[in-house]
Amino acid sequence: MIPAKFEYIKASSVSEALSLLNKHGDEAQLLSGGHSLIPAIKLRLNQPKMVVDIGKIPGLDNISEEGNNIVIGANCTHHQIATSSVVQGGVNVLAQTAKEIGDIQVRNKGTIGGSLAHADPAADYPAVILASGAKIEVEGSGGKRTIDATDFFMGIFETALEDNEMIIAIHIPKSSGGVYLKFSQPASRFAVVGCAAIKNDNGVSIGLTGVADCAYRASAVESAYNGDAKAAAAHAVDGIEVMSDNFASSEYRAHLAKVYTERALNALA
Amino acid sequence: MLMKINVKVNGKDYTSEVTPMMSLAAYLREVLLLTGTHIGCDTSSCGACTIKMDGKAVKSCTILAVQADGSDITTIEGLSQNGKMHPLQSSFKENHGLQCGFCTPGMIMTAENLLSENPHPTEEEIRHGLEGNFCRCTGYHNIVKSIQHAAESN
């Protein structure tokens, strides 16, 4: 497949990448691992005029512990996250989820920042990012800001990132217990439905992916949960417009959302 | 616009000029004439184009050649040493691990990555480890057997 013509620049710093984004506006796309962007460019679903490679910017691929948070640089690969002892120790459910993404070759190249910015409605990370109450640290030409996970995902391939902003890191509160269960699409292994459940001080928090046009926090389940997983899981799609496609009708998806929420709650208990 | 890249492939240094649009797989095949790396789906599903880049198995159809600037790459052609096949290559030969052979270079490169991280995998771990590689002859049983034999002979 021959992509449409584009120019390519390898940015050596965040500020260089941001000034290129400012200069080229809508015509520029950031490239990190490239495992969502490059197939999209080949299939001409995305036709940037300028590709800004942020994959080699120093300092964006670190994983560290900061107080009660695990901080994961945007360029960390799924494999790095799956095998990091810091992630396994602080928020093991994220390491386990990273292991479920794609295949080993994809995990060796694809990055968490790229996946979150791409915001595929069937991606795995968003469920865990939402359930863990993570914050996304982003930088634009005006400086840095953090976005709560609950405000980050806005629709199909749509996030709260401004055109001239990029993800720097993800700050995830440590948690002692968490689980991510998914019903995989049999060919692509993307989530038809994926449910993350994480214990917190007030009980449990639930993130659902694959169900709607973007992943969401199932607050109705959280407030209904008092030990009866089945009763609480019945609220998994309350107020949600459930997606329908050739893999799963909205009725079937809603059913799966309830089943996987119930299983996740039971696995956590 | 052509861009200059420096890469090390199978121990040899190359400097080339490529368009930003060229995939690493196409670069290996069309510029370096290393046609052992195959292109199947060209969208990172099938795994035929798997190579090792900086020590890790990756799908070279979904990496731009310009992204690979400065990288150390091993392709299927780089596995044999002094005319002697790599243990995985001989094991695939002995165990009928290939039928049409199209997927074989990718299977072997992925298996090499798997065995480097887990030298003695179970059958289940091998099958799971190959989730990113398709064999359209469906010859999976002998592929798994070949990898098991290579691991045992190590």
Image (cartoon, rainbow, N blue to C red):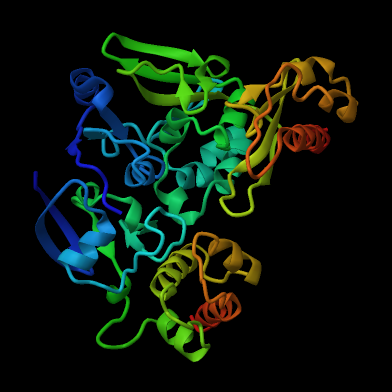
Query: Which quadrant of the figure contains the N terminus of chain A?
Result: bottom left
Give the number of marks.
Answer: 0
In the rendered image, residue A10, in percent from the top left (x then y), is placed at 19, 37
Quadrant of residue A87 in the image? top right
Residue at position x 13%, y 54% in the image: B6
- Most distant residue in the bottom direction: B94
Q: Note whether A154 is above or below B82 in the view shown.
A: above
Question: From what the image shows, is residue A72 above or below residue B41?
Answer: above
Q: Position of residue A191 (x, y in %)?
A: 62, 41
Q: Residue furthest top?
A: A142
Q: Residue at x 45, y 51 (%)?
A: A106
Q: Is residue B124 above or below residue A105?
A: below
- Asked whether A143 or A256 is in front, the reply is A256
**Percent x, y of residue A84:** 50, 43
Rendered view: A94 above or below B69? above
Left or right of B135? Residue B89 is left
Q: Nearer the viewer, residue B56 or B62?
A: B62
Find residue A29 and report its image quarter: top left
x 24%, y 59%: residue: B72
